[in-house]
Image (spheres, rainbow, N blue to C red):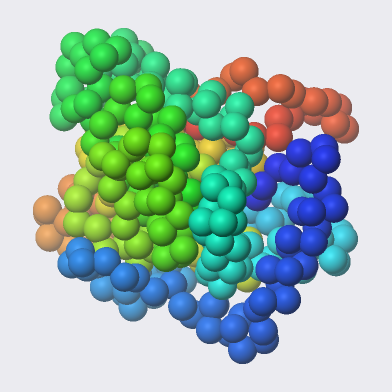
Amino acid sequence: MAGIRLPTEDSDVSQAARQVAAVDLISDDDRSVAADSWSIKSDYGSTLDDDQRQADAAEALSAVPYRAASDYSSDKEESDAEAVSSMLGFQRYWDATYADELTNFREHGHAGEVWFGADVMETVAIWTKNLCLEISQRHLPNHLVNTNCLPAGQTEKDLSGWSVLDVGTGNGLLLQELSKQGFSDLTGTDYSEGAIDLARSLADRDGFSNIKFLVDDILETKLDRKFQLVTDKGTLDAIGLHPDGPLKRIMYWDSISELVASGGILVITSCNSTKDELVQEVEAFNQRRIAASQTPHSAADQDASRDNTFQYIDHIRTYPTFMFGGSVGSRVATVAFLRK
């Protein structure tokens, strides 16, 4: 699963037709099923109770008002655009999309859409590599601590010690770019089986058989491993476009915090949230964690809740910007957070 695609100048007609076709594939019954599907098909044992996860997120949502990412959309006033965008929050939409792209790959060898564009993907991979090297060599500001679990003193050719997870990997091309930068312990997950089939096929064709791909839903993950680097390119965006987006975004942060190792890095790329909005969302998550640590629990649970928070590190500053309404903005934001 990925986020909103940024169409090229000559693809408006095909893009509109593709969206309509995808929506046509989804009946009213399918929409109902999709809203509740979030199914997992992996061999990993669950470490969290899914019903409890839903209940915790609902309780947190009632206590902390938060706007869904779709509320920030510039075209939210257009009913047709809103109807199409809302489908991006359903698994059925992505299953239909990747079934189409897998067919195109098998028949024509096409890799499919590159979400946010190939230039953004390459920028994210290079910037992330440089950030990890800085962390490895302890070149972070003094206030950023607790990076002891990360490999120290690595050179540019020795990023193989970093374990990497890409959530909502889609066609897996971001992992291929990260592999080119020197990472080798690479895993991609997506809740769409079609996406994983496509990602595996592309990786095999392009000579990246070392990349592992698993069907897994970040909101109800069955992974029982922590990673030193976790990337998200558009997945949080798509989650926010579900009708229950605010609730599912809370579930997202609860889940992803369990996947990033202590001292590890989370890199999020979004076209629906600005850097400041992502930082605010992380701060809200941290406040929930701190509040949870103050409720009656065992000492170990309290320490885990208090320590399992994120801290802003940096963001990509080289994306093209534009001026609108007196404010400077960018179509894409990439922000890195340190897991304490």
Q: How many marks?
A: 0
Q: Is residue 20 left or right of residue 247?
A: right
Instruction: State the quadrant of the C terminus.
Output: top left
Q: Is residue 190 visible?
A: no
Picture coordinates of residue 322, whole percent (x, y): 80, 25
Q: Nearer the viewer, residue 168 or 152?
A: 168
Near-viewer residue (92 or 236): 92
In front of the other: 331 or 207:
207
Q: Position of residue 265 (x, y in %)?
A: 34, 33
Q: Residue at x 74, y 24 (%)?
A: 321
Residue at point 35%, 62% (across, down): 215
In the image: residue 51, left or right of residue 171: left
Along the viewing direction, whichever of 282 and 9 lies nearer the viewer: 9
Q: Tell me which residue sits at (17%, 17%) in the image.
A: 152
Q: Is residue 186 above or below residue 71?
A: above
Q: Is residue 63 above or below residue 136?
A: below
In the visual, does 102 lie left or right of 329? left
Among the 4 quarters of the image, the one containing residue 26: bottom right
Whether residue 70 is visible to the viewer of this picture, yes or no, is yes
Q: Residue pushed farthest front?
A: 107
In the rendered image, residue 255, in percent from the top left (x then y), is placed at 35, 57
Q: Is residue 301 left or right of residue 277?
A: left
Give the residue drawn at x 79%, y 54%. 14
On the image, which quarter does residue 100 sit in? bottom right
Question: Which percent across, then down, holds residue 41?
Answer: 31, 70
